[in-house]
Amino acid sequence: MKKKTVTGLVTGASATGITLTSSLTSTGAACTGVCGACSLGCASFAGLAAVGLFAFLGARSKKKGKITESPQ
Amino acid sequence: MWKGKKVSKIQKKSRMSLLKRFIWYVVGFALFFAPFALFNRGLAFLLDEKRSGDIHATCFRMPLVDMLTGKGIVILSVTGISLILLLVSAFLLGPFFCGKLCAAGAFTEYLSRLLPDKWKVDWSKYVNPVPLRYGFFAAFIIGPIIGLSLSCSYCGYSFFEKFTNGGIWGDFGVLGSTAIITAFLWLVVFGLFTKGGRGYCNFMCPVGAAQNIVHAVGAKLPFTMKIKYDRKKCVSCNACVKDCPMRALTQGEDKKIQHSNHNCITCQQCVAVCPTKSITYGFGKGGWQQEEVKPVQEPKPVEKGA
C-alpha cells in the first residue's frame, strides 16, 4: 500500500513536471509562430507514436491468438 | 455491425443507456459548446457581459490568472457562476457535467464504440490514471503562479470546438504543434484506440480532475448522490466493469467489484447494465469495500502444442 502511494506521488509529480517544462518551451520568446518547424517535429512524433501503437496492438493480438489457460 | 448477432438482455440495457446518455450529450453540446453555447450566451446576455459563446466559461485557468494579476474574481459573471455550478453539482451529484453534459468526452467515447474491442487498449491496466490526471491538474494550477500558462492547445475542449467550428463554419483556427499532439492523443490514442474511449478524460482533463476531487469528498457524506453497491446482490458477472467508459470499476480477487471516486463520472452506465440492481445511484452510504483487494489476474498465454 505504501509502495503504491509512493508510486502514485512520483507519477503525479512527474506529470506536473513534464507539463510545466513543455509549457515553458512552448511559450518561449523565440517562437514567432510562423516557421512551422515545431509542427513538423510534432507531426513526426505523432507518426512514430502511431506506428508504435499499431505495433503494440499487432503484438497483443498475436499474443491473444495463442491458447490461454484459466488462472485456477 | 450488429446485424445477425444475438443480443443479450445486458447488451440491450447497455444500448438503451447509451442512447439516453447521447440525448443528454446533445443537450450539453447545445448548452455549453461553440458554435451554440446557449447557456453561456444566455448568461452573458443576462449579466450584460461581452464574451464569445464557447466552453471557456468552465475554464479556471483564466480566473486564476485574473486572481494572480490582481484583477480578482467576479462571482456574478459567466465564468464565476459556471464554476460554482460545476463544483456544487460535482459535490452533490458527482461529476454531473462529465457524465451527462460534456460532449467533448462523449465524442471520443461514442467514436471508439464503433471500433471492435480487439483493436483497443485498456491503458489503465498499465498506468494508474489518477495520479497522472491530478499531476496534470496540479501543473494547470501551478503554471500561472510561477508565471507560466498552459496553452489552450493542451485542452480537449478547445480541440473539440475547433472540430465543431471547423465542421459547421469551416474555420479550424490555428493548428500549432501542441494542438497536433493533443489531437493525436485525444482523438486517436486515448479516443479511438482506448477501451471506453475516454482516455483523455481519464488521464488529462483538468475540469474532470477538479470535479473528482470535490466528488471524492462529497461521496463520503450521506446526503449526496453517489454510485452505490450492494455486495450481497452482486453475482460477479463483470458486466459493469466491461461497460464502464472511465475504467473506474475493477473486479477484485474475491470476485466483488471495486470502485474509484477519483475517476468515476457518474454516467450510470454500470447502473443500467447491472442485471441484479446491485449497483444503484442515490443517497446514503456507498457500500464499496474500503480495503483494496488484488485485481483478478489475466490468464497466462500458453504456446500452442505446449
Image (tube, grey):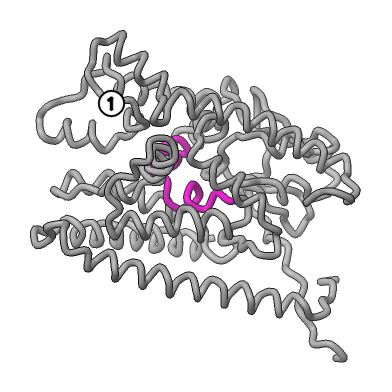
Helix, strand or loop under label 1:
loop
Q: In the figure, B241 relative to B276: above or below?
A: below
Is residue A10 left or right of B283 when viewed as pictured? left
Q: Which of B192 and B195 is in front in this view?
A: B192
Q: In the figure, B231 relative to A2: above or below?
A: above
Is residue B236 left or right of B141 when viewed as pictured? right
Q: Which of B2 and B104 is in front in this view?
A: B2
Q: Looking at the rendering, which quadrant does residue B265 occupy? A: top right
User: Quarter of the image containing the C terminus of chain B?
Assistant: bottom right
Instruction: Determine crowd level at label 1: few under 14, some 14-19, many 20+ residues with C-alpha closer than 10 A.
Output: some
Q: Which residue is drawn at 36% across and 42% down?
A: B158
Q: Residue furthest front?
A: B170
Query: Which residue does the numbered mark 1 point to in the structure image?
Result: B52
Is residue B296 left or right of B154 when viewed as pictured? right
Q: Is residue B173 magenta?
A: no
Q: Which of B75 and B27 is in front in this view?
A: B27
Residue B24 placement (x, y as % from top left): 59, 27
Q: Please report the bounds of the magenta region as a residue range.
A: B197-212
Q: In the figure, B218 relative to A69: above or below?
A: above
Q: Which residue is drawn at 79% across and 54% down?
A: B255
Chain hosting mark 1: B
Give amino acid for label 1.
Answer: Ser
Residue A16 placement (x, y as % from top left): 31, 56
Residue B228 placement (x, y as % from top left): 68, 33
Name the chief secondary structure element in magenta: helix
